[in-house]
Each structure stands twice: as structure tokens, then as C-alpha cells.
Image (spheres, rainbow, N blue to C red):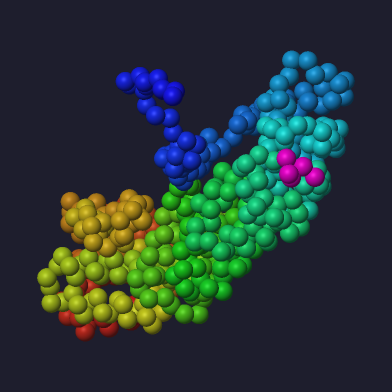
Amino acid sequence: MTVSEPSEPNERPRMSLSEMLSRSQPLRTRALPPLDQIKRSVERVLTRWPDAVFTPEDRDRERLAQNMLSRVSHWQWKTITTQRVISAAIAVFDGERCERPDLTPVREFYYSEIASREPGTFLDSMVGIYIESFTPGARHTLQLARALEKRASDLGGRYRKLLGALPDLFGPDAAPASLAGVMHEVDDAYRMLQSIGLSRPHTAGLAKAAQKPFFDRLAPDLANAEARRKLFNWLTPQNGPVLQAGAGPAVEALLSVWRERTPPDALRNELSETIIAAWNDPRLHTGGIWSGFDPNLRAVLLRWLTHQDMKFFCDMVTATQDNHMWPPRRNFWLKLYRDKMIDEAWVAFGSDALAYAQRNFVRKGKADMGRRFGRQLDRRGSTSLLIMRIGNKIVVDGCHSYKTHIFRMNDRNAPKLYEREYYCDDIMRASPNSKPHNSIDSWSQWVLQNV
């Protein structure tokens, strides 16, 4: 009989393969962390540092263009970097040089380079130049579009994202209207364009070309708060500068809604304060968007401002002066406005009233009180003035016991509307015709007879 050898004391019995598989630990897979935070971080970086290429100063652009012309003409490429080639392209395709005949060889060079260069900084930068220099109908825009369309599959992430949102990007005839449609679909077009690769939406040539069709799409609905919000998110973005060039047609579209009707007081005040905060008071400034503004629509805004200034003055006096004679005076002036007798009005606040108006009547952050109203400096600023034009007369009324004064407009001593500073005692001394308010009936008849 054969006797088996004793096993070692610490030796473990061997397991069969089936036993090993039955006891095996379950496989564990490591899940990838969410990528949302990474995506947001990338977008922040691209927003803060949108350009990998140095944009040359205006004073350097002609030199860069001529240098590139010399290199193309003599085919000399020593001591030049890709970054410098791209900076020169910005100069060659800018508004001053994009159609210059002498630079045609340079533009042709860039078209051929787009066709042959490897994917990377150069190719992506030329897409940026196409967007920035986009001019409807221009030859350079058409040529850049044709060249870049053939390389669309080779673009970097930023511009692939833009092309995904705007498939007509390289169709110059369709791109502005298509972009306007994309802008119209979102609440904040400025922010959306930044998110898809247009780092400076207001200045990019393509976005500027899309502005008018965008405004045209919004115009029929500007009586509605949603459409107005979309418009102002573009015109006065929270994370960007106020649009100046090209803003006039948008403001005209907004005011044209109210050409034949009057918005509620709260909306009228909000719109007028927003407009003058962004583009200045048209009564004080004639440049900017006001230089070519539709005079009939400008008159709509002036009517709003006249009403608003009268309301500011009346509300301030009502709140700060306890006098039984004031309410009928207030009602008289407001009735004259409703009867369309008061053509223009301007307020000069005293110091106390100015502070009160700032706290109570003007929406915070919407108006610069130092520019929005005049100042009355006599009597330590205790008196405030309402200066009105009624036909060919200038009428000055004041709070407390200040008399009402009437001047002819051609009187050289008549106070002018929209001045920064007034002195109520000087006006009183210069006045040829005045009356106190101690009899409201007599006073109101006197005003009507003299205007």
C-alpha cells in the first residue's frame, strides 16, 4: 500500500479553476468625472484670452502690409514667424486695405496659404480675420469664404463650434441673415455669440452685418417685454460695452412702436432713462446716434423727457412741500402738458431736492444726476426750478413761494433750456413779467393770457 506523504503544516489546499472563478472579485470600472466644469473653464479662458495672435496697432499696419508685399514679391521668408504673417494679414484685410489694388498679390498669397497650410494657428486665425473683416458683397470676403470652406473640416475647436451653430458661416450672402436668426432665437445674443467663438460681438464684421436683420426681426414685437429685453441685451450687454456704431436704427425701431400711442408711465420712464444713460440726452448732445436720427422719432423721446422732467419736479415738490396751493398748481401744469401746450421742459434742482430725487425718482444706476438735470445755485440750493417752452415763450416756475416768470424767447435775458446751472435770483431780477401764486384762479388765468 502506498502511503502519501504528509502535507506541510501551512500549505493551503489548491483550488480548482472553477472555484477560483466563483470566488473572483467583481470587476470595478472607474467612472470619468463630469466634464462640465472643464468645459466651463475652457470657455472662460477663451473669453478672457480670445486671440492667440497679436492684433497690430493702426499705426503699424501699413508697415506690416508693405513688408509682406515685399516678401511675396521677392519670395524672401527668412526671419519671419507665423505670428507675424498673421498680424500682417490683419492689416492687409482691414477696412482700409482690403480692396487696395497694390496689395492684391498679398491677398492672393493668403488664399493659397489657406489651401496648403497644415491645420493649426494660421488656419484658425484666418477664420477670425474673415469674421472680423466681413463686408457684404466685398471681393475679399467672397475669396476668403471660398478658401476657408474647403478647409472647414480642418478647423480647431473654437471655429468648429461656430460652424456647428452657423452652418452658413462660409456663405457670405446667407451668413448675416442666418446669424440674425440664431441671435433672435436666444435671450442674450451678445453672450451667445461670445460662447460660440465671436469674442467681440459688436465689432466683428459678420455680427455688424447681422445687426439690421436682427433688429428687423425684433421690430414687430418691441411692444412686448421679451423682445425689448432681447434688444437691450444686445445693445447694452452686462458683460460688454454699450453698442454705439449701428445702434441708431435699433433705438428708432423701439421708439417707432410708440409713434402713435403712449406707453405706461413706468415703462416710458424706464425706456427714456435707459436710452439717455446709454447714448446721452439728445437735448444736450447732437452727435453719436442722434446725428442722423429720424427727427419724428427723436420728437417722441423729447415728449417723453418733457413729461418725465415735469413729473420729477412735481413729485419732488409734492413730497417735500406741505402747501395747500401746490396741488392745483401741479394739476395746472400737467393739464397744459396733456393739452400739448408745453413743448419742452427742463428741471434745475436745488441741492436738497437733487438728493431727494436721486433717492426716490431715478432708477438706481440708470441716470447720472449731474448730467440728467440742471442745478439751481441761489438761496443755498433751497429752491428748484421748472423751465418750460410754451410756443415762443419761456416760462419759469419754482417751488415754495417763488413766483412764475414769463419771457419771450428772443429776450436776451431769458433763461435758456438745458443749461447746467441756473440762479433763481438772477432770473427773478431779469424777469419782465411775473406773478405770485396767492390766487390760483387769477394766477392760472394770467399764465394762459401771457403764453
> Chief secondary structure of the magenta span?
helix
Where is residue 283? Give x, y as percent: 45, 59
- The segment highlighted magenta reads 150-154
Residue at the extreme front of the image, as rendered: 1
Task: Tell me what residue is drawn at x 49 percent, y 61 percent.
Answer: 187
Q: Is residue 56 visible?
A: yes
Rendering quarter of residue 57: top right
Image coords of residue 7 (percent x, y): 37, 21
Q: How many marks?
A: 0
- 226, above or below 175, in the image: below
Whether the magenta-drawn stretch holds residue 262 is answered as no
* Residue 153 is a magenta residue: yes
In this view of the protein, which residue sits in the foreground, 132 or 95?
132
Position of the C terminus, as image quadrant, is bottom left
- With respect to residue 338, does 190 lie above or below? above
Residue appearing at x 73%, y 19% in the figure: 80
**Residue, x 63% and y 30% (percent of image)?**
53
Between 27 and 281, the one nearer to me in the picture = 27
